[in-house]
Image: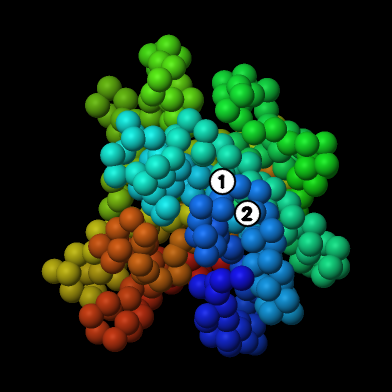
């Protein structure tokens, strides 16, 4: 087996966990398909075995300190950006979508990858439950969006997906359906923003240029009649719409048997502006407003019966964002990228600390 990126630094990861646990932290672990040595295996059954091996190593080496396992982080992002848009590794898609793609089929591969990601998660969950004897304080999930929920809750794709995608959608065998169904202990929800959606009938009649995107039969926008859906953040895709997190949570409660939910990512960024003084950079009242409004909506959802058990702010500190590098700052703590990476708490970090003490 080829060397995995995580294995190369496994001692460092282990040492980091040892540092944090005595401080009262409860580490959560997120896996990712991008850690696989051969990304082409993601369109084949080999993904299950490869990912199970990877998960087994992580359970074995970190299991005494990690109590929450997120098997796959943002599986939708991997399936769609890598196999429909072709903008992330391994850069596969139909040529009409992106001339730079190295092969692929946007009409089928996003669904094949999704299918094998679900099976890979289920295999890892089964391994953990049978070999490592999961206890009542240990939880294992696939971090997912709604497209993944029907198989994991009911054992199969929804009738709507089957109707829209037809023969291009892979099918579960009876054995696979039993493996997948109920293979999550809680749902991890990443929520940042929302879009307006308009039905696009032209997609229904195009049988040549077919992709995951056209299958949605929708045009997503951030404004309606020239009015933005909310205040714009630093990133072009992020507009503030706090009520959307409540709407999503209520949808999950209604349609998927009210599972335990953790908000695994929620946050807002600003553009990295080197002309600001340190004092100015630490004054992020817009981030305080963002968290205050989103957490208020989460509380409202809880009062209406949604089973939310935890919340992760993105991010604890300014970091390297995959799409924007160091040009975007999501952190509660400011990082001086040119001055030895020294950290300084922003106003939002102090606000959130006080909020959590209440």
Residue 241 shows in the view: no
| Quarter of the picture holding the C terminus | bottom right
In this rendering, would 16 be left or right of 305? left
Using a 10 Å C-alpha cutoff, classify the residue at mark 2 as few (fewer than 14 neighbours), some (14 to 19) or many (20 or more).
Answer: many
- How far apart, in angstroms, are the residues tagged by discs 2 and 1? 8 Å
Residues tagged 2 and 1 counted as in contact (Cβ below 8 A):
yes
Indicate the secondary structure of the residue bearing disc 2. Answer: helix
Q: Which residue is mark 1?
A: 43
Q: Nearer the viewer, residue 28 or 285?
A: 28
Q: Which residue is mark 2?
A: 47
In the rendered image, residue 86, in percent from the top left (x then y), is placed at: 38, 44
In this rendering, would 167 be left or right of 137? left
Q: Is residue 310 above or below residue 205?
A: below
Q: Is residue 214 above or below residue 307?
A: above
Q: What residue is shown at x 50% (from left), y 56% (from top)? A: 39
Which image quadrant for residue 164?
A: top right
Indicate the secondary structure of the residue bearing disc 1. Answer: helix
Which image quadrant for residue 146?
A: top right
Give the farthest residue toward the left: 275
Q: What residue is shown at x 52% (from left), y 81% (from top)? A: 9
Using a 10 Å C-alpha cutoff, classify the residue at mark 1 as few (fewer than 14 neighbours), some (14 to 19) or many (20 or more).
Answer: many
Q: What residue is shown at x 37% (from left), y 69% (from top)? A: 319
| Quarter of the picture holding the N terminus | bottom right
In the rendered image, residue 296, in percent from the top left (x then y), is placed at: 53, 49
Q: Please say which color scheme the image uses.
A: rainbow
In the rendered image, residue 345, in percent from the top left (x then y), is placed at: 38, 76
Q: Nearer the viewer, residue 344 or 323?
A: 323
């Amino acid at each position: 087996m080829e060397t995995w990126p995580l294995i190369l630094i496994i001692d460092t990861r282990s040492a980091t966990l040892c540092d944090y646990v005595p401080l009262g932290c409860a580490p959560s672990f997120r896996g990712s398909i991008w850690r696989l040595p051969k990304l082409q295996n993601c369109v084949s059954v080999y993904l299950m075995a490869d990912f199970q091996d990877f998960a087994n190593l992580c359970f074995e080496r970190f299991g005494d300190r990690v109590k929450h396992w997120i098997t796959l982080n943002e599986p939708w992002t991997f399936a769609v950006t890598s196999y429909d848009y072709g903008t992330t590794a391994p850069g596969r898609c139909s040529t009409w979508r992106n001339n730079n793609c190295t092969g692929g089929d946007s009409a089928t591969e996003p669904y094949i990858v999704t299918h094998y990601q679900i099976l890979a998660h289920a295999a890892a969950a089964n391994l953990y439950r049978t070999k490592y004897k999961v206890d009542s304080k240990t939880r294992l999930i696939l971090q997912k969006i709604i497209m993944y929920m029907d198989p994991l809750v009911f054992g199969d794709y929804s009738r709507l997906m089957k109707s829209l995608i037809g023969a291009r959608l892979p099918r579960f065998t009876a054995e696979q359906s039993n493996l997948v169904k109920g293979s999550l202990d809680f749902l991890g929800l990443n929520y940042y923003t929302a879009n307006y959606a308009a039905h696009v009938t032209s997609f229904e009649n195009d049988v040549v240029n077919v992709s995951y995107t056209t299958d949605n039969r929708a045009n997503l926008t951030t404004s309606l009649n020239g009015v933005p859906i909310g205040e714009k953040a630093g990133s072009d895709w992020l507009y503030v719409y706090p009520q959307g997190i409540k709407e999503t949570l209520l949808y999950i409660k209604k349609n998927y048997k009210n599972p335990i939910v953790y908000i695994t990512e929620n946050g807002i960024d600003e553009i990295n502006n080197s002309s600001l003084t340190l004092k100015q950079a630490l004054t992020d009242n817009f981030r305080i407003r963002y968290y205050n409004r989103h957490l208020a909506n989460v509380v409202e959802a809880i009062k209406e019966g949604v089973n939310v058990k935890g919340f992760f702010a993105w991010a604890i500190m300014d970091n390297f964002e995959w799409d924007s590098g160091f040009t975007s700052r999501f952190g509660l703590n400011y990082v001086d990228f040119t001055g030895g990476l020294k950290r300084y708490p922003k106003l939002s970090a102090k606000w959130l600390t006080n909020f959590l003490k209440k």
